[in-house]
Amino acid sequence: MSFKRRKIAVIGAGFTGTTAALMLAQKDLGDIVIVDIPSQTNPTKGKALDMLEAGPVQRFNAKISGTSSYEDIQDADLVLITAGLPRKPGMSRDDLVATNEKIMTDVSENIKKYAPNSYIIVLSNPVDAMTYVCYKTTGFPKNRVIGQSGVLDTARFNTFVAQELNVSVEDVTGFVLGGHGDDMVPLVRYSYAGGIPLEKILPQERIDAIVERTRKGGGEIVNLLGQGSAYYAPAAAMVQMAEAILMDKKRILPSIAYLEGEYGYNNVYLGVPTVLGGKGIESVIEISLTGEEKSNLDKSVQSVKKVLEMLKVGSG
Ligand SMILES: NC(=O)c1ccc[n+]([C@@H]2O[C@H](COP(=O)([O-])OP(=O)(O)OC[C@H]3O[C@@H](n4cnc5c(N)ncnc54)[C@H](O)[C@@H]3O)[C@@H](O)[C@H]2O)c1
Ligand SMILES: O=C(O)C[C@H](O)C(=O)O
């Protein structure tokens, strides 16, 4: 018997993909293959080589390569999908659906062909729908096709709470449910600072402002950047999920999971609390919701379903 390093494929060598690849390498979670479409020069290979050369300084051993050939992801254990267009100021994530569905279909077919046993984390937007496309196209079991939104949305919520209270981000635990859109559902009732319910230490109007800023958090960055969208925090979020899976940590993290009756919804990918471990999504945790929370979640699900209806892959 011999042990092998994990193989992680990152599809898309743009801002989120390359940032995630470097973070994966810094944590030495495995060897990394970065894939992007062919181009006249070879930027994907160049980015990978540049990252590899950071290894001696940062003391990581990860092998990192760049390619435009999907054969190179052969037998990857984990695949992060970041391929696709980001939105521009004035656009919603849903405006990307037609273009990114084509890209997601192509990427998913290649993963199915070359890495049929892999676990997948999808980032490309609109991410609830793109995770659905990936699930339908690969035909992989639902525990192996996972979307990222809640770790990022919760990180934003926690950042704003920590800023407001002038306390460490390490002591803030927020909780965001629902689709990755402006009607996502930050659950204040399940959010704490140092174990103290948020409602006990912040006035309601400050909480309301934080909830609103969290919902629009992606758009805030898009407007500030002027071109492209957020990538440091999204990459960190994907890598936290990747680590939970690769290290079988069984962390309770929000993931975009395929629901079959949980929370009363069917045939939809949605952000919910999950246990993430060596089997991917090992379970969906169901918590009780008040009438208002449930109706906010219903609204968010309706928005996700509207996008699913636009998909070529079908929503049935
Ligand atoms: N779910 C989230 O929380 C979240 C967060 C941030 C970004 N995103 C989304 O992630 C996606 C990527 O964002 P980004 O900032 O990295 O964009 P980017 O433009 O920097 O990179 C995207 C890359 O995908 C590549 N690509 C396009 N088609 C491809 C294909 N068929 N195969 C392989 N690569 C292909 C492009 O060449 C480009 O390099 C966007 O859709 C963005 O909206 C989602
Ligand atoms: O807002 C976007 O378009 C990118 C991403 O979904 C984010 O929340 O930062």
Image: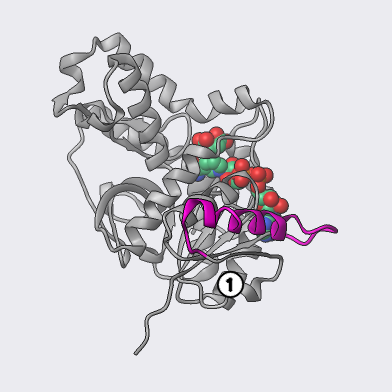
Residue found at x 48% / y 50%: 23
Task: Identify the residue under disc 1.
Answer: 73
Picture coordinates of residue 258, whole percent (x, y): 38, 56
Q: As drawn, which residue projects farthest toward the right?
A: 40
Q: Is residue 48 magenta?
A: yes
Viewport quadrant of the N terminus: bottom left
Ligand 2 - quadrant of the structure image: top right
Residue 110, placed above or below residue 164 = below
- Is the residue marked 1 within 8 Å of ligand 1, measured from its CB? no
Whether residue 102 appears in this view of the structure is no
Picture coordinates of residue 174, whole percent (x, y): 28, 32
Q: Is residue 159 magenta?
A: no
Residue found at x 74% / y 54%: 43
Q: Look at label 1 and name its amino acid.
A: Ile
Query: Could you classify mark 1 by the number of other residues whose Cα lies within 10 Å: few (under 14), some (14-19), or many (20 or more)?
Result: many
Residue 47, placed above or below residue 298 = below
Given residues 84 and 261, the one toward you in this image is 84
The way the protein has been coloured in the rendering is: one colour
Given residues 177 and 116, the one toward you in this image is 116
Residue found at x 56% / y 27%: 221
Q: As drawn, which residue projects farthest toward the bottom?
A: 1
User: Can you tell which quarter of the image residue 33 is in?
Assistant: bottom right
Q: Which residues are magenta?
A: 37-62
Query: Could you tell me which secondary element the residue under label 1 belongs to?
Result: helix
Picture coordinates of residue 249, whole percent (x, y): 26, 58
